[in-house]
Image (cartoon, rainbow, N blue to C red):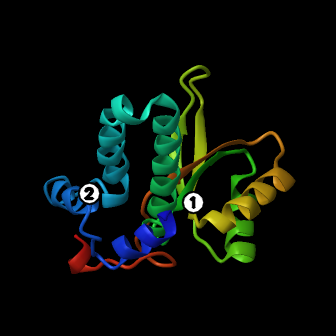
């Protein structure tokens, strides 16, 4: 169900159910996707039906809606989702060069300051795809096992090697 809904949302369409209301809400709140709004609407309706069908069936329905929503959201946002890494290491130059050579990705050097120590520290920032995140972790670990690395999901990365800017999507 989640896969089907995700494909429908990817085509910027609705099935005519509560997802139509979710699409209307998304029109006014464009920072939210239809796939993120829909589980809340369906969940509210399911909670109201708990008085009729009982708590057991209601809980199963909520689990189904949450899983379907996650799957639909991963399909609609699949092309956009990526990882952002911040790496703090004395071996930042070697790590950056290896990222260039082995991953064909760029990195940005930021200036950081440790608030506890007060010392200036270089910080590498690098955006990678979900698949490349594993390779990036291996590279950092092999070069500097004591490096400090923050790796988090980001919703969207635009620019070379990722999605390109499009006026239609603004």
Reading the chain from its start, which is encountered first: label 1 or label 2?
2
On the image, which quarter does residue 136 sit in? bottom right
Q: Position of residue 69 (x, y in %)?
A: 45, 54
- Closer to the camera, 132 or 73? 73
Q: Residues within 10 Å of mark 1 (few under 14, many from 20)?
A: some
- Closer to the camera, 27 or 5? 5
On the image, which quarter does residue 149 sit in? top right
Q: Position of residue 33 (x, y in %)?
A: 32, 58
Q: Residue at x 60, y 39 (%)?
A: 121
- Quadrant containing the C terminus in the rendered view: bottom left
> Number of labelled discs?
2
Q: Position of residue 75 (x, y in %)?
A: 48, 68
Q: Which mark lies nearer to you, 1 or 2?
A: 2
Q: Residue at x 82, y 51 (%)?
A: 141
Q: Is residue 28 left or right of residue 142?
A: left
Cα–Cα span, label 1 and label 2? 39 Å
Tell me the tag on residue 126: 1
Q: Please say if 58 is above or below 20.
A: above
């Amino acid at each position: 169900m989640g896969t089907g809904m995700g494909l429908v949302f990817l085509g910027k369409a609705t099935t005519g159910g509560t997802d139509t209301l979710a699409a209307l809400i998304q029109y006014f709140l464009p920072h939210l996707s239809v796939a993120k709004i829909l589980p809340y609407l369906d969940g509210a309706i399911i909670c109201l039906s708990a008085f009729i069908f009982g708590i057991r069936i209601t809980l199963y329905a909520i689990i189904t809606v949450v899983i379907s929503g996650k799957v639909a959201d991963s399909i609609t946002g699949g092309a956009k989702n990526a990882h952002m890494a911040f790496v703090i290491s004395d071996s930042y130059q070697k790590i950056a060069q290896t990222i260039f050579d082995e991953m064909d990705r760029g990195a940005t050097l930021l200036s950081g300051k440790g608030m506890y120590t007060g010392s200036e520290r270089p910080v590498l920032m690098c955006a990678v795809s979900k698949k490349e995140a594993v390779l990036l972790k291996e590279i950092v670990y092999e070069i500097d096992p004591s490096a400090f690395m923050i790796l988090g999901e980001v919703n969207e990365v635009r620019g070379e090697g990722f999605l390109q800017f499009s006026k239609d999507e603004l």
